[in-house]
Image (tube, grey):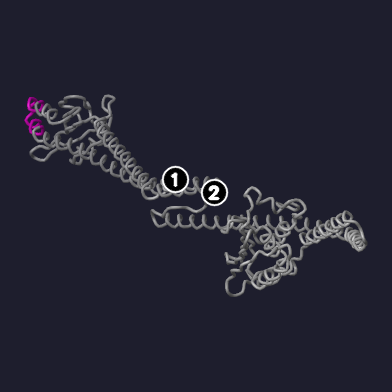
Amino acid sequence: MEGALRYTGGVLHSVRLTLFLSIVVPLMLVVGAGVFLAASGVEKNLDQRLREDLELVARAASGPMARAMEDSNDLVLDETLKSIFRIGRVYGASVFNADGEQVASLGVADTSLQSSRSANQVIESGERGGTFRRVDGVSVFSQFTPLISTDGRIIGLLQVTRKRSDFHRLVSSARIWAVVFWCAVLLIVSLVVVLGHYGAVGRYVDRLLEAMKGMGPGRWPIEGDASGPREIRQLHDGLRELGERMARAEEEIRQRVERERQLAEQLEYQEKVAMIGRVAGGVAHELGAPLNVIQGRADILARQQLGTDSERQLEDIRHQVRRMTRIIEQLLDCFRHVPDARRAIDLAPLVRELVAGLAEDPRAGDIPVTLDLPDGKLMVNAEPTRLELACLNVIRNACEAAASRVLVQAERQDDFWVLHVDDDGPGIPESLREQVFEPFYSTRPAGEGTGLGLAMVKSVIKEHQGRLVVADSPLGGCRMSLSWPVAGS
């Protein structure tokens, strides 16, 4: 089970990782691509705007400068150059004649444009242009604007420069904002995924994990109703069904082990009974002939005219011989095992015949026996001789212990017919209720009981897979309950 939990935990971590890799990463790549494209667009827009700014400044100043050059008015030319610096952030401004020689300048600017291809193209074509170049070791963007006279001739060139770092500063700012935006989106999406996963799936999976940790021998079924998304509920139902199957399998294994234990005990008991039966049979055979001889010699001596003391001694001998014979008979009955002779038999007429026969049994005395049997047949699966012997011993013992009455009842309990035998005698103390079934244990005075009757009854009940219970009787004495399997159960 722990291995299953570790495997499930690994799967969950893989699910989270898969969720992150399959949703968050592609989403952030898409967002990053969008941010990159947006930043590139912003960079181009800023670059274009800076160029347009310089172009507007140059166009605004080109007209006055062209007239000043036509009029050779250096004062107006200088003021116009100064005005360029007042309009915006300009690094330098210069005015050149048609030959590319510098006429006036302010700030950092080229001294000659004869080597500048862009400047020459502007002079030749008369169209504005610009390019990045280095001036005095500084990278700048130069905007070239032709100066056109009133008759349409190109009489000069205006150069307005701006540091390249100004462009990079704005572009870097745009990139920083793009990265900040992308990180913010990443953080928000990650939080949404994590919190959404926990709220929609994670907490229900945690409950399943807790339920799985609680599963084990004796506590397989899962309590509580399924909750969460449909797939999680299906997992919960499947896990609950698995737990129920495990519980049933565990119960089946327990019952099977119990049955095997009972069968092993029964086999051991039967082997023991068979061995004791063989020993008892041998002992009975060996003792039977000497006892018969003793009994015969005692009968011969009793027919002779002996004194009173001798007759008393002979009667004691005959009494002990009869007692030994009865012990041997009960010993054989106790350990006789005939399981193959079981069949369906009606318990009711058998008990009635036993009770009727007790009227002539001197050991039962004259205690009346009351029968309270249900109507119909009481069919049990038993060997008739052993069944009769067990019932006879229990009813006879009740008659010997009773003060005035014995009650015999029968009732159906599950797959058993239970025969209750009650008496109003002194009863059996609870501390002795297990010992009374041991061979040769008797609660009667010495010489009045063999201690084999109840041992034989227990042997018969056990070989029939029944139950024998000793309890207090409603009549005030002892209740013996014999359970016999219902025929066909």
Residue 71 at x, y percent in the picture: 6, 30
Task: Reply yes or no: does residue 71 show up in magenta.
Answer: yes
In this view of the protein, which residue sits in the foreground, 485 or 57?
485
Up the image or down, 164 lies above or below 468; here it is: above
Numbered disc 1: secondary structure: helix
Crowd class of label 1 (few under 14; some 14 to 19; many from 20; radius 10 Å): few
Crowd class of label 2 (few under 14; some 14 to 19; many from 20; radius 10 Å): few
Residue 471 at x, y percent in the picture: 60, 55
Magenta residues, dominant SS class: helix
Tag of residue 17: 1
Up the image or down, 447 lies above or below 153; here it is: below
Residue annotated with mark 2: 216
Ranked by sequence position, the earlier of labels 2 and 1 is 1
In this view of the protein, which residue sits in the foreground, 344 or 286?
286
Numbered disc 2: secondary structure: loop
Residue 253 at x, y percent in the picture: 62, 56
* Magenta-tinted stretch: 65-78
Task: Reply yes or no: does residue 407 show up in magenta.
Answer: no
Q: Which amino acid does label 1 sit on?
A: Leu
